[in-house]
């Protein structure tokens, strides 16, 4: 015995699936945003800690960076 489903019920079911998919995507984007912000904060804290360690060890920052591009023979 075949049961006939009204077309409105099919449209509502498809709309529910679309809404759930949209909500899932939004939740994933929010989680990704929170993770990226926390990674940025963690990186900032690590850089700050490394600066404190350098100061305690007495390491000075030197700008004497020798690079291959500084001694390039093809430079005009």
Image (cartoon, grey):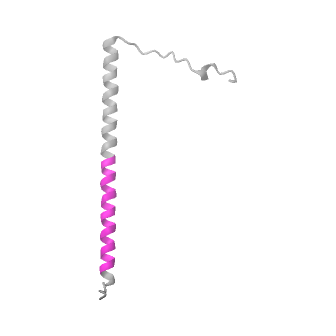
Q: Is residue 26 magenta?
A: yes
Q: Nearer the viewer, residue 3 or 70?
A: 3
Magenta stretch holds residue 64? no
Q: Position of residue 13 (x, y in %)?
A: 30, 74
- Seen as rendered, the residue at the extreme bottom is 1
Taking the spot 32% from the left edge, 68% from the top edge, the residue there is 17
Q: Is residue 51 above or below residue 28?
A: above
Q: How many marks?
A: 0
At a point 31% along the width and 43% down the height, the residue shown is 35
Secondary structure of the magenta portion, mostly? helix
Where does the magenta region start and end? 9-32
Rendered-image quadrant of the C terminus? top right
| 70 in relation to 25, above or below | above
Tell whether 73 sits left or right of 24. Answer: right
| Relative image position of residue 33 (x, y in whole percent) | 33, 46
Task: Give the x, y percent position of residue 68.
Answer: 60, 21
Q: Quadrant of the N terminus?
A: bottom left
Measuring 29% from the left and 80% from the top, which residue is drawn there?
9
Q: Is residue 66 positioned above or below 34 on the image? A: above
Q: Give the farthest residue toward the front.
A: 1
User: Where residue 2 sits in the image (x, y, percent)?
Assistant: 31, 87
Q: Residue furthest top?
A: 58
């Amino acid at each position: 015995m075949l049961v006939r489903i009204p077309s409105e019920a099919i449209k509502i079911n498809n709309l529910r699936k679309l809404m759930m998919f949209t909500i899932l995507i939004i939740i994933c984007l929010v989680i990704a945003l929170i993770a990226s912000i926390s990674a940025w904060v963690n990186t900032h804290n690590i850089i700050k800690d490394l600066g404190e360690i350098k100061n305690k060890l007495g390491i000075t920052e030197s700008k004497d960076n020798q690079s291959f591009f500084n001694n390039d023979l093809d430079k005009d």
